[in-house]
Amino acid sequence: MGGTPFITVEGPIGVGKTSLAKAIADHFNFTLLKEIVDENPFLGKFYEDIEEWSFQTEMFFLCNRYKQLGDINKHYISKSQPVVADYHILKNLVFAQRSLNPQEYQKYYDIYQILTTDMPKPNVVIYLNASLDTLLKRIKLRGREIEKNISPLYLEQLSLDYDETMKSFEQQFPEIPVLRFSGDEFDFVKNDGDLNHIINVLSASLKKRSVQP
């Protein structure tokens, strides 16, 4: 798979997806695509009562990410302009499987399949993960009011869900490399050496696949 670079950064809440995506965009002069989070009117209620507000929350995210990716494909990727996104559309299923009941999830999954059929696929996925302690510290450090009620148990389960989802993704799409980095071992925000290592690994992967940054 060659062509225009389209890189997605994924991982659980607080692991540093946006920070890394921005650093990559700045380094290569790529367009940065950031997911809509704070604009979700249901998210605060969701963290207070997951069962009550999960379907509304997940549908909002799905529809907005669908619109974002459609726009980025139309205005950038189709015109050979590189893009790095701080999410992959598959994250919708990670969260939905954790929060929706079986009946709701089936409805959600059917809609997801319809909306994502012709979505652009990344050349490379960067997968970040970290221990629960690291995730909780980073969430506290960035101080988002909307995240103050996140349950540590929910966050821990979400991290495990991500691991399983990425394994399944690699089996389903073996042609798309997944570059894995531990947030416990790499502090790419404060340590330039750690960031440069990730940049170098990414550059080598793109070059190997005849994708020129």
Image (cartoon, grey):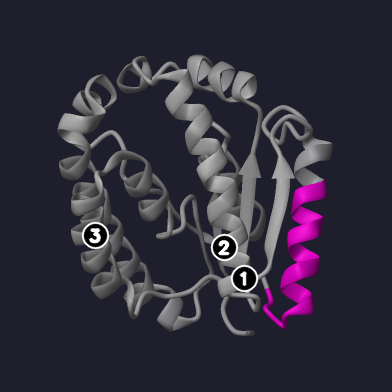
Residue 145 shown left or right of residue 23 in the figure: left
Quadrant of the frame with the N terminus: bottom right
Residue 13 visible, this angle: no
**What number is the disc on residue 171?**
1
Mark 1 → mark 2, Cα distance in angstroms: 5 Å
Q: Where is mark 2, residue-wise?
A: 168
**The residue tagged with tag 3: helix, strand or loop?**
helix
Front-lying residue, 74 or 161: 161
Q: Is residue 171 visible?
A: yes
The alpha-carbon separation of the residues under discs 3 and 2 comes to: 19 Å
Q: Please, what is the three-letter code of the amino acid marked with disc 1?
A: Gln
Separation of marks 1 and 3 at Cα, in angstroms: 22 Å
Label 1 element class:
helix
Residue at point 19% right, 53% down?
103
Between disc 1 and disc 3, the foreground one is: 3
Report whether 30 appears left or right of 73: right
Image location (x, y in percent) of residue 147: 36, 22
Q: Amino acid at mark 2?
A: Ser
Query: Which residue is labeled 3 in the image?
Result: 106
Q: Closer to the N terminus: mark 1 or mark 3?
A: 3
Identify the residue shown where x is 73% and y is 31%. Answer: 187
Q: Is residue 158 above or below residue 94?
A: above
Amino acid at pointer 3: Gln
- The quadrant of the rendering that contains the C terminus is bottom right
Give the residues in magenta.
197-212
User: Quadrant of residue 100 in the image?
Assistant: top left
205 is within the stretch colored magenta:
yes
Picture layout, residue 1 above or below residue 52: below
| Residue 107 sits above or below residue 118 on the image | above
